[in-house]
Amino acid sequence: MSVAAHKQITAIHKNDPEWIIRLWLAIHGGDPAPEVTARAVDAAAVAAIKSLSTYLDPAKQKAINAALH
């Protein structure tokens, strides 16, 4: 059995959190994709941070939730 060669991927954009959130919204936001506004990006980022904070200890989770409000 031969092993297939992997093609190197060259990114032409910066992989920052905003880009990832915009990509996710473009993929999962509906058909056609809705216009992605700064407010939608902020809301998605807050939701992701809140969701991830549940894996932290309660004091840190409380601090993050307080900072987001």
Image (cartoon, grey):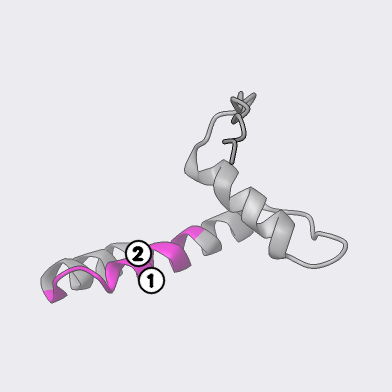
Judging by the rendered image, the residue that carries numbered circle 2 is 68
Circle 2: residue type:
Leu
Residue ID at (44%, 64%): 48
Is 33 magenta? The answer is no
Residue 27 visible in the displayed image: yes
Label 2, residues with CA under 10 Å away: few <14, some 14-19, many ≥20 = few
Residue matched to label 1:
51
Q: In percent of the image, x 67 and y 58: which residue is there?
A: 25
Crowding at label 1, few (<14), some or many (≥20) Cα neighbours within 10 Å? few
Compared to residue 43, the image places residue 14 above or below, namely: above
Quarter holding the C terminus is bottom left
In terms of depth relative to the viewer, which is nearer, 69 or 64?
64
Q: Position of residue 12 (x, y in %)?
A: 64, 24
- The quadrant of the picture occupied by the N terminus is top right
Q: Can residue 69 be seen in this snapshot?
A: no
Q: Earlier in the sequence, mark 1 or mark 2?
A: 1
Magenta stretch, residue numbers: 45-58
**Residue situated furthest front in the rendering:** 1
39 and 31: which one is in front?
31
The image shows residue 16 at horizontal and vertical percentages of 49, 38
Question: Alpha carbon of mark 1 to alpha carbon of mark 2: how far?
Answer: 12 Å
Q: Nearer the viewer, residue 20 or 8?
A: 8
Residue 1 appears left or right of 49: right
Seen from the viewer's position, the closer of residues 15 and 2 is: 2
Mark 2 residue element: helix
Residue at (59% x, 36% y) in the render: 2
- Indicate which label's residue lies in the foreground, 1 or 2: 1
Residue under the point 49% across and 45% down: 17
Under mark 1, the amino acid is Ser
